[in-house]
C-alpha cells in the first residue's frame, strides 16, 4: 500500500542511522526472492508508486520536501512512514500505515504530529509468468481524525486502486538488452467523505532497469556486488484534482533513484523533483528500508495465515 500524496520524509541523523543499521542485515550478495515475482521478473517495492505484488513485509521511509505556504513562504515538510503488510492468503494482504509529520514553516505555521492512519486490502488476481505480467486490485482507507489535529484531516477518504506491472523479458534476442526494463503503474479515484474536500485521481508510473535481471537472465556482463543488486528506477507519483477550484490540476513529482535488493529486503534512495509550482519547490529526498518478512521469518510472522506461501 502506498499513499502517494504523502510519501515524503526527512533525511535526519536518525534517517541515516537506521538504514545503516539495517544494512548490516541486508548486505549480502544473494539475489532477491521477493514477493512480486512473475517468471524471472522481480518487481521491487518502489517508494512512491506501489508495486503490483502482495507479501509479508515491513516498509520504513524517510524523506524531505520543500513547498510553499498560502502566503508564498517556504516551508519544509519532513515525514517518517512505517507500513506493515500482512498476507491473509498467498494472494490477499491487509496493510496498516502510520506517518509522523514535521512541518517547519515561518510565522508560527510549524506543526508536528501523526497524519491519519491508513488501512488497506490488496488482492493479486493475475500473474502471467511467460510475459512477466502481474495485476492486483485493492482499496486504501484513510481514517479521518485518527491523527494529530494540527496535521491530519478530520475526514476519511477511500481509494480503490488497480495495480499492474510488466517486464520486457519476452522481447526477441535482437533487443535482449531491453529485457531488463519493466514498467509498473497504479490508478484509482481518491474519494473524500466530505463535501469540503475535493476528490482526485491518484495515479503513478515507474520505469525500471534491473541489473540483477541483466546479469542473471540476459548477459553476464561481469557486474559484482553491490552493483549486481541495483535497480535504477524513475517514479512518477501524480494526483489530478477532479472537483472544486483545483479541478483538472495535477500535482506530483519525478523521482529518479536506485534500489538495492537481496533476498531479505532492500534499501532505496530517490530524489523528489516537483513537476510544477503547486507540487513544491526545490529537490527533496526519499529514503527506504524494506524487509521481506516471508524470507526473514518464513516460519512465523512471514507466512500467510491461511494457505501456503508462493
Image: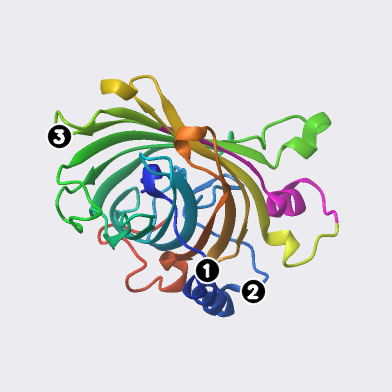
Tag 2 and tag 1, C-beta contact below 8 Å: yes
Circle 2 sits in a helix, a strand or a loop, which is it? loop
Task: Name the quarter where the C terminus is drawn.
Answer: bottom left
Which of discs 3 and 2 lies nearer the camera? The answer is 3
Compared with residue 183, is residue 218 higher up or lower down, i.e. above or below?
Answer: below
Labelled disc at residue 201: none
The Cα–Cα distance between marks 3 and 2, rounded to whole angstroms, is 46 Å
What distance separates the C-alpha of mark 2 from that of mark 1?
Answer: 9 Å
Q: Position of residue 245 (x, y in %)?
A: 29, 22
Quarter-of-image position of residue 207:
top right
The residue most toward the front is 107
Vertical placement of residue 213 versus 264, above or below: above
The residues tagged by marks 1 and 3 sit, at their Cα atoms, a distance apart of: 39 Å
Left or right: 282 as drawn, with respect to 48 = right
Task: Please tell me which residue is depicted at 14% across the width and 51% down the height of the picture.
Answer: 145
Residue receiving disc 2: 28
Q: Identify the residue shown where x is 20% and y is 59%.
A: 148
Q: Which residue is mark 3?
A: 193
Vertical side of 232 occupied by 71: above or below? above
> What residue is disc 1 on?
264
Q: Which image quarter: residue 301?
A: bottom left
Q: Is residue 214 visible?
A: yes
For the residue pair 271 and 110, the one nearer the viewer reads as 110
Residue 29 shown in magenta: no
Q: Please tell me which of labels 1 and 3 falls first in the chain.
A: 3
The colour scheme used here is: rainbow
The residue lying at 58 percent from left, 58 percent from top is: 269
Category of crowding for the residue at label 1, using alpha-carbon neighbours closer than 10 angstroms: few (below 14), some (14–19), many (at least 20): many
Between discs 2 and 1, the one toward the N terminus: 2
Q: Position of residue 295 (x, y in %)?
A: 47, 68
* Residue 109 point in image, percent of width and height: 31, 54
What is the magenta range?
Answer: 203-221
Amino acid at each position: 500500500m502506498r499513499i502517494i500524496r504523502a510519501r515524503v520524509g526527512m533525511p535526519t541523523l536518525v534517517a541515516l542511522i537506521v538504514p545503516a543499521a539495517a544494512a548490516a542485515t541486508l548486505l549480502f550478495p544473494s539475489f532477491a526472492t521477493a514477493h512480486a515475482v512473475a517468471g524471472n521478473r522481480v518487481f521491487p517495492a518502489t517508494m512512491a508508486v506501489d508495486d503490483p505484488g502482495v507479501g509479508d513485509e515491513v516498509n520504513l521511509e524517510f524523506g524531505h520536501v520543500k513547498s510553499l505556504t498560502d502566503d508564498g513562504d517556504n516551508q519544509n515538510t519532513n515525514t517518517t512512514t512505517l507500513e506493515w503488510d500482512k498476507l491473509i492468503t498467498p494472494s490477499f494482504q491487509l496493510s496498516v500505515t502510520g506517518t509522523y509529520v514535521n512541518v517547519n514553516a515561518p510565522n508560527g505555521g510549524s506543526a508536528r504530529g501523526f497524519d491519519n492512519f491508513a488501512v488497506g486490502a490488496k488482492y493479486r488476481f493475475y500473474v502471467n509468468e511467460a510475459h512477466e505480467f502481474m495485476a492486483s486490485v485493492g482499496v486504501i482507507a484513510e481514517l479521518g481524525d485518527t491523527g494529530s489535529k494540527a496535521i491530519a484531516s478530520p475526514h476519511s477518504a477511500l481509494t480503490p486502486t488497480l495495480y499492474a506491472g510488466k517486464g520486457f523479458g519476452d522481447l526477441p534476442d535482437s533487443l535482449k538488452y531491453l529485457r531488463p526494463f519493466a514498467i509498473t503503474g497504479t490508478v484509482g479515484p481518491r474519494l473524500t467523505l466530505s463535501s469540503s474536500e475535493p476528490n482526485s485521481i491518484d495515479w503513478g508510473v515507474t520505469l525500471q532497469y534491473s541489473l540483477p535481471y541483466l546479469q542473471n537472465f540476459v548477459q553476464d556482463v561481469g557486474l559484482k556486488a553491490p552493483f549486481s543488486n541495483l535497480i535504477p528506477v524513475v517514479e512518477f507519483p501524480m494526483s489530478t484534482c477532479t472537483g472544486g477550484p483545483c479541478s483538472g490540476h495535477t500535482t506530483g513529482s519525478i523521482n529518479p533513484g536506485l534500489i538495492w535488493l537481496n533476498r531479505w529486503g532492500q534499501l532505496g534512495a530517490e530524489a523528489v523533483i516537483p513537476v510544477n509550482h503547486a507540487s513544491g519547490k526545490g529537490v527533496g529526498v526519499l529514503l527506504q528500508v524494506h524487509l521481506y518478512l516471508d524470507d526473514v521469518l518464513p516460519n512465523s510472522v512471514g507466512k500467510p495465515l491461511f494457505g501456503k506461501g508462493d
